[in-house]
Amino acid sequence: MDLIEYLKGVYEAWIDYPKREGTVITNKYRIQHFLGIGSYGLTYICLDMDTGQEVVLKQAKPSKGTVSRDLLCREIYVLGRLRHPSIQRCLASFEYKNQLYMVTEYVNGQTVEDLIFERGAVFSEKETLCFVHRLMEILSYVHEQGFVHFDIRIPNVILDGDQIHLIDFGLACRLGEPICTDFGADEETTLSRTVEAPNDLYAIGHFILFMLYSGYDSCTLEVELNSGWEDELTVSPMTKHILRKLLQIDPPYMDTQQFVRDLEQWLD
């Protein structure tokens, strides 16, 4: 059994191996460099040879078969229905050599993850909540359009100058639809039986913790619900109240408006 698992891993690594820089896809997109590989996709920065613009090319992960194709199809569908300056537009989608691809706008800037762990950025309590208030304007729009992002994490929020961008809608779902666990549900995806706003708000709670822990000596890549943040972090009673509701320790916020009202009360 161990040998079978090993051979499976070798095969998957081989078929998921990134394409080389300079490779041209459909005589239009020249790969400039590989951005990264996720659970269900490979992402590249490419030059659109027709327009001269940089774009992001996302490929369904070959080793995940129909699951990755279905998720990428859903991302194409969701992005096609969102029109917001802080959300990448889907520019094109196509099949090439039996593989599904999606082309989106390229967002320059740095992720919150890079700012904290590579640049050493430290966010105060007020800076954190001001930042999240701006992020909530984007998320509120997503919810108003009938979707839940389902993957709000520090690698998926980019700061470009003064503008915040929310990226990677690969796990986005419609509000109210059953939660799909076929692709391996994590803690965020098992908080309710159907997709609801609290799924994203729970993730926002962890997002806030990461930012608050940016000045903490033992900051790690994993901030757990039971890590003792209430004892370790020095925050105002209102912030603690907000976090306890976001993390569903106390009765949770049921929609973004409830959370934003408390957030604006704190900021005022």
Image: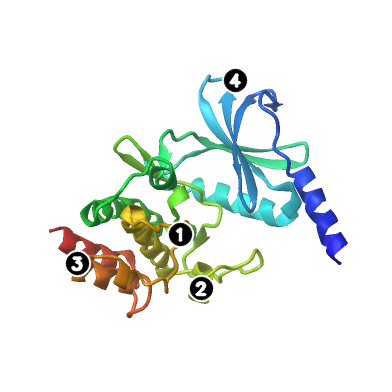
Disc 1, SS: strand
Viewer-nearest residue: 211 or 178? 211
Residue 29 visible in the current orientation: yes
Q: Does dot 2 land on a helix, a strand or a loop?
A: loop
Q: Residues within 10 Å of mark 1 (few under 14, many from 20)?
A: many
Q: Which residue is mark 4?
A: 49
Q: CA distance from mark 3 to mark 2?
A: 33 Å
Tell me whether the residue at label 1 lies in contact with that at label 3, contact meaning CB atoms closer than 8 angstroms: no
Of marks 4 and 3, which one's residue comes earlier in the chain? Answer: 4
The residues tagged by marks 1 and 3 sit, at their Cα atoms, a distance apart of 32 Å
For discs 3 and 2, the disc positioned in front in the rendered view: 3
Q: Is residue 165 above or below residue 261?
A: above
Helix, strand or loop for disc 3: loop
Q: Locate residue 227 relative to residue 122 in the image: left or right.
A: right
Query: Which residue matches tag 1?
Result: 147
C-alpha separation, residue under disc 4 versus residue under disc 1: 33 Å
For residue 13, side relative to residue 160 (left or right): right
The CA span between labels 1 and 2 is 12 Å
Q: Which mark identifies residue 158?
A: none
> Of circles 4 and 1, which is in front?
4
* Percent position of residue 196, x then y: 44, 69
Residue 45 picture location, percent across and down: 56, 32
State the quadrant of the C terminus: bottom left
- State how far apart marks 4 and 3 are (Cα): 52 Å
The Cα–Cα distance between marks 2 and 4, rounded to whole angstroms, is 43 Å
Residue at image location 47% in from the left, 39% down from the top? 89
Q: Earlier in the sequence, mark 3 or mark 2?
A: 2
Find residue 194 and name its label. Answer: 2
At a point 30% along the width and 48% down the height, the residue shown is 122
Q: Which residue is mark 3?
A: 236
Q: Are marks 1 and 2 in contact (CB under 8 Å)?
A: no
Category of crowding for the residue at label 3, using alpha-carbon neighbours closer than 10 angstroms: few (below 14), some (14–19), many (at least 20): few
